[in-house]
Each structure stands twice: as structure tokens, then as C-alpha cells.
């Protein structure tokens, strides 16, 4: 146990030394632009989202923690009601029994690589890897099914790390969620 703890302490120390503002990026997400046309067209090539996806693709296979910040003037109650009443494909995220009424953080998550693919799933446009024209059911926010109607404006915050830190993303995600207190999700 001592060796494991020392290794983890060493890894976190290296991560803290190399972590800086260059490891953080932010992207505006206008949910009103989540058109159903992207079920059959690649959203990465869309006018509104192309630049975002180009930048996210450069992150590549690095592990990330991320969160969605709500910048629209909309209540937590309205968001939860819309999500609960939404229909459509995909698995909805967990809704807390006692969600924070004053939070402007929608959701906190993690991914071990290809953050751009995770964003596609959260937008509600995840497709089959072998047949990109076939939409699949994926875990995620499914924003196109409920946030589009509310015209929610979000900022997608991404913190990325070196590949050897992938095993620590759960711990980092848990700590970030504790600090940010998101409205929905398992934290």
C-alpha cells in the first residue's frame, strides 16, 4: 500500500508541475444550433461547430475532465423539468433527488481520449463507428432533445492531461464535481 500511495503522490506531483492554463480550453455551445440534420450529416463540419471540433480533435488521445457551464438565464428547475420530460434516443444522465437550485454548472464528466467524440454524444448525435450514417444509443446529455428548445447557451470547459494520467480521471472528476456542484449527473 505504501508503494502505491508513493507512486500516486509522485504522479500527482508531476501532474501539478506540468499543469497550466495551456491545459484548459473553453468552447461556446449554442444549443439552438443542434439541428436534427446532424443525425445524418457530420456535425464536426457544420458552420457553427467546425472550429470547436477542430480544436478538440487536436487534443487527441489525452484524458480530459470537462464540465458544461450554463450562461443562459434559466433556472435549474426548468432544466430538470425539460430533461425529465424529453423524449428521444440515448440514455439520459442521472438527475439528483436534491439538485442545486442556484448552480450554473450543468454536468461534470471525464473521458480517457477523444474528447470530441464525447461532445458529440452529449449533443445527441453519436453514430455507429462502422456505419456513420446509423445513429446509436449513447450515454450523454442528449442536448438536442431538450436543451435546443430552451435555447440554452453553454460553455464547455475542458481540462486535458498527459496520457499516463488516464487512471486518475475518476478522482479528478469526483473532486471537480464536489467543487462545482452540477445540476445533473452522478456526482
Image: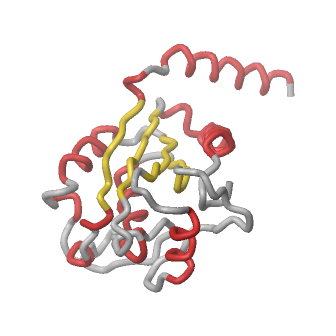
Q: Quadrant of the C terminus?
A: bottom right
Residue 160, by quadrant, is: top left
Residue shown at the point (41%, 23%) measured from the top left: 21
**x and y percentages locating residue 97 in the rendered image:** 73, 68
Residue shown at the point (35%, 56%) measured from the top left: 153
Which residue is most to the left?
A: 47
Q: Nearer the viewer, residue 116 or 82?
A: 82
**Does residue 10 lie above or below 135 as drawn?**
above
Q: Nearer the viewer, residue 100 or 93?
A: 100
Q: Looking at the image, what colour scheme do you see?
A: secondary structure
How many marks are shown on the rendered structure? 0
Residue 92, by quadrant, is: bottom right
**Does residue 79 lie above or below 136 as drawn?**
above
Q: Is residue 36 visible?
A: yes
Is 59 left, or right, of 102 in this rendering? left
**x and y percentages locating residue 180 in the rendered image:** 61, 43
Which residue is most to the right?
A: 1
Q: Quadrant of the N terminus?
A: top right
**Does residue 98 lie above or below 49 as drawn?**
below
**x and y percentages locating residue 9 in the rendered image:** 71, 20
Q: Nearer the viewer, residue 13 or 149?
A: 149
Which residue is most to the top?
A: 17
Residue shown at the point (46%, 61%) measured from the top left: 74
Q: Nearer the viewer, residue 43 or 98?
A: 98
Residue shown at the point (24%, 73%) measured from the top left: 35
Is 6 left, or right, of 73 in this rendering? right
Is 93 left, or right, of 157 in this rendering? right
**Does residue 76 lie above or below 92 as drawn?**
above
Q: Is residue 167 visible?
A: no
**x and y percentages locating residue 80 in the rendered image:** 57, 70
Amino acid at each position: 500500500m505504501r508503494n502505491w500511495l508513493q507512486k500516486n503522490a509522485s504522479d500527482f506531483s508531476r501532474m501539478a508541475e506540468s499543469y497550466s492554463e495551456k491545459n484548459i480550453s473553453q468552447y461556446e455551445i449554442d444549443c439552438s444550433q443542434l439541428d436534427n440534420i446532424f443525425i445524418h450529416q457530420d456535425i464536426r463540419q457544420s458552420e457553427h461547430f467546425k472550429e470547436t471540433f477542430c480544436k478538440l480533435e487536436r487534443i487527441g488521445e489525452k484524458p480530459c475532465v470537462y464540465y458544461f457551464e450554463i450562461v443562459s438565464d434559466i433556472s435549474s428547475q426548468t432544466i430538470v423539468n425539460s430533461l425529465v420530460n424529453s423524449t428521444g434516443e440515448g440514455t439520459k444522465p442521472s438527475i439528483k433527488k436534491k439538485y442545486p437550485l442556484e448552480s450554473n454548472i450543468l454536468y461534470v464528466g471525464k473521458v480517457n481520449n477523444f474528447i470530441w467524440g464525447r461532445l458529440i454524444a452529449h449533443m445527441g448525435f453519436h453514430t455507429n463507428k462502422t456505419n456513420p450514417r446509423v445513429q446509436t444509443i449513447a450515454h450523454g446529455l442528449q442536448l438536442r432533445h431538450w436543451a435546443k428548445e430552451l435555447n440554452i447557451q453553454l460553455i464547455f470547459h475542458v481540462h486535458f492531461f498527459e496520457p499516463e494520467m488516464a487512471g486518475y480521471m475518476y478522482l479528478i472528476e469526483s473532486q471537480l464535481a464536489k467543487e462545482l456542484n452540477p445540476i445533473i449527473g452522478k456526482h
